[in-house]
Amino acid sequence: MNEMQRYQDWRRHATADPDLMAELEAMAANPAAIEDAFYRDLAFGTGGLRGTIGAGTNRMNVYTVAKASQGLADYIVANFAPAARSIAVSRDSRHKSDLFAEVAARVFAANGITVWRYEQIAPTPMLSFATRQLHCAAGIMVTASHNPAKYNGYKVYGPDGCQITTAAAKTILDCIERLAIFDDVKMLPLADAEQAGLIRAIPASVFDDFVAAVHGTSQLAAGTAIDRAVSIVYSPINGTGLVPVTRTLREAGFTDLFVVPEQEQPDGDFPTCPFPNPEIEAAMALGIQYAKARGAELVLANDPDCDRVGTAVREADGSYRLLSGNEMGMLLLDYICARRVENGTMPAQPELVKTIVTIDMADRIAAHYGVTTVNLLTGFKFIGEEIGRLEAAGREADYLFGFEESYGYLSGTYVRDKDGVNASFLICEMFAYYKTRGITLAARLAALYRDYGYCLNTLHSYEFDGAAGFAKMQTIMATFREGVAEFGGERVASVADYLPGLDGLPQADVLKFTLATTGSVVVRPSGTEPKLKVYVSVSAADQPAAAAREAAIVAGLGGYFA
C-alpha cells in the first residue's frame, strides 16, 4: 500500500484511541502530514522503537506498540520453553507511557506470556535488573529517554538484561513485518489477564535488591575518612529517578539533599525543561539556580528514564561549572582505579569498556593503572554485551567501569545498561571523598589534564525531519564515503568505515576520520532521532589551543550539511 492507502486503512480501523481518530481526521486536508505519518513503518532495531507520538505507521501509538509487542511475543514463543516465557515491563513518566505499557502487557498475556510489571514508574536500569532477577525471556521499557515531550519509545531487552543483539532485533523485526497491524494482534482485557495471573506486580524485594546492588558495587571509600554531609541539589527532571536516587543516597548517608520542587514529580510535559536532557545547559539551569540560593556544592540531574546523569560543581568564585560526559567519565575512571589500587581490590585483568566516540584520553588514564581499554560501537548495549562476554569467560569481576560520552556510566555488572542511580551515587561518593581532602572536582580534572595532556571532545547534531530529511541524511553519508581530504585545514590521514563491519565489531553506519596531527572526526546517523551526529576530538597543549582547532574543524564541516 502507498501512503494514502495506508491512511485510509487507518481511518477505517484505528478507533481504539480517540486522540488518533481526531488526528487522522485533521490530516485529511494535509497531504504532507499524511506522507510523513505513513511513508514508512517506525524503524525497529536494537534500540526497539522510538518516534513522535501520534497517528500513523511512522509514529508511536497503541497500534504500532501492539504490533511490535505481538512480534516480540511470537519471537518468545518460538525460542523459549513455556516455563521460561515471561517478560518484565516498566515505563517512564511520558505521555501515553502508562497506556503503551498496558497495551504491551495485554498482548503478551494474550500469547500466554507472564508479565511482571512495576506498579509505579521505574528507571531503565531497574527494568534491566528485574529482567535478570526474575529470569525473564525479555524486558521492555516504555521511554524515549532524553528526547523532547512529543516522543515516546519502546526499548527491548534480552534475558541477560542487555538491549537485544543485532541478530535478535532482525529476527524480531521479521516477526513484526509478517503481521497485519489491525488483524494479527492478540490482546486480552486487562482484568482478565490479571485474574488469570498473567499480569503480576514486580515484588518490592526486587527494588530492595537493586538498591543493595548499587550500594555493593559503588562504595569504594570504605575504611577511609569521608564526610557525606555535602550539600546536594538533585533533579529527576519530572522522570523516574526521584524514588530510587534519593533512597540510595540517603541510605548511604547523604542527608543534605534538596530536590528541585518544579522537577520533582512525574510530568510528561517537562514544563520547566522542554529538552529533558542533562547533557544540555538548559536542563541543568533550574537546579543551578537553587544551588546558588542554597550554597550547595553539587548539582545532579537525571534524564526521564534515569539512565544518564548530568553534573555541575561550584567553583571557588561561586559560579557553577558543568562537567561534560567525558570529563565525568574520566574523573570516575581515575577515582575507581585509584581506590581499587589503594584497597587492594583491582582485578587480575581489569577492563575499561567505552565507545569509539568517547574521549581517547580515558585510554591513557586506564593504561596508567594497568587497565585494558575495550572500544566498541556507539550504544551502551555493546558495553553490556562485553560484560556478558567476560561473564561467559569466568571473568565478570574484571569489568571495572564502562562509560560513554553521552553521560552514561556503570561500575557494576548487576545490570547491563547504563545506570543513572549507580552513577549518581558514585559521583556523590567521589565528590565527598575529594572534598574531605580539600580537593574540588575541577582541581582533580585539571590535574588529569596536566598528567595526560589536554583533550577536547565535542558533539554537533544536524537535524533532518520527515521523509525528505531522511533521504538527505543518506545523501550526506554517501558524500562522506566518496572521500574527504581535510577538515578545517587539517589533513585526513585515514578513514575507518564501520558499515561492512570492522575490527570485529558489527556493521554500523559510522565513519571515523583520523586527522594528521590533532585528533579525529566521527560521523553517524542517530539511532533514535532524525539527526546526523558529528563527534570532534582534538588534542592540544591547552584548552584555548584545542578550542581554536576544534572551531576550525567544525567550520569546515558546515558545507556538508547545508
Image (cartoon, rainbow, N blue to C red):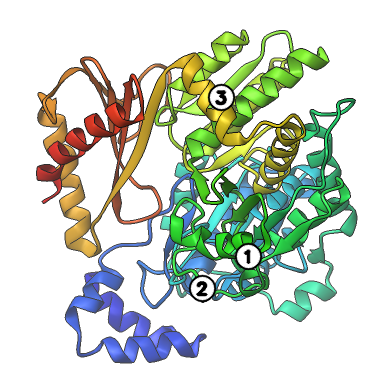
In screen coordinates, is 468 left or right of 59? left
Q: Residues within 10 Å of mark 1 (few under 14, many from 20)?
A: few
In terms of secondary structure, where does tag 3 sit? strand
In screen coordinates, is 327 left or right of 307? left
Q: Residue 339 location, x and y as percent?
A: 75, 21
Identify residue for label 3: 353
The answer to which of marks 1 and 2 sits earlier in the sequence is 2
Q: Quadrant of residue 52?
A: bottom left
- Amino acid on which the number 1 mark rests in the picture: Ala
- Amino acid on which the number 2 mark rests in the picture: Thr
Q: Residue 259 location, x and y as percent?
A: 70, 64
* Callout 3–callout 2 Cβ contact below 8 Å: no
Q: Residue at x 56, y 64 (%)?
A: 289
How many marks overall? 3
The answer to which of marks 1 and 3 sits earlier in the sequence is 1
Does residue 469 appear in the picture of this structure? yes
* Callout 1–callout 3 Cβ contact below 8 Å: no
Q: Residue at x 52, y 40 (%)?
A: 168
In screen coordinates, is 447 left or right of 556? right
Q: Quadrant of residue 43?
A: bottom left
The quarter in which the N terminus is drawn is bottom left
Identify residue for label 1: 293
In screen coordinates, is 200 left or right of 63? right
Distance of label 3 from label 2 (alpha carbons): 35 Å
Q: Residue 98 location, x and y as percent?
A: 63, 73
Does residue 176 appear in the picture of this structure? no
Q: Residue at x 35, y 30 (%)?
A: 543
Identify residue for label 2: 272
Q: Residues within 10 Å of mark 2 (few under 14, many from 20)?
A: some
When the figure is inspected, residue 351 is found, relative to residue 320, above or below; the finding is above
Closest to the observer, 25 or 558: 558
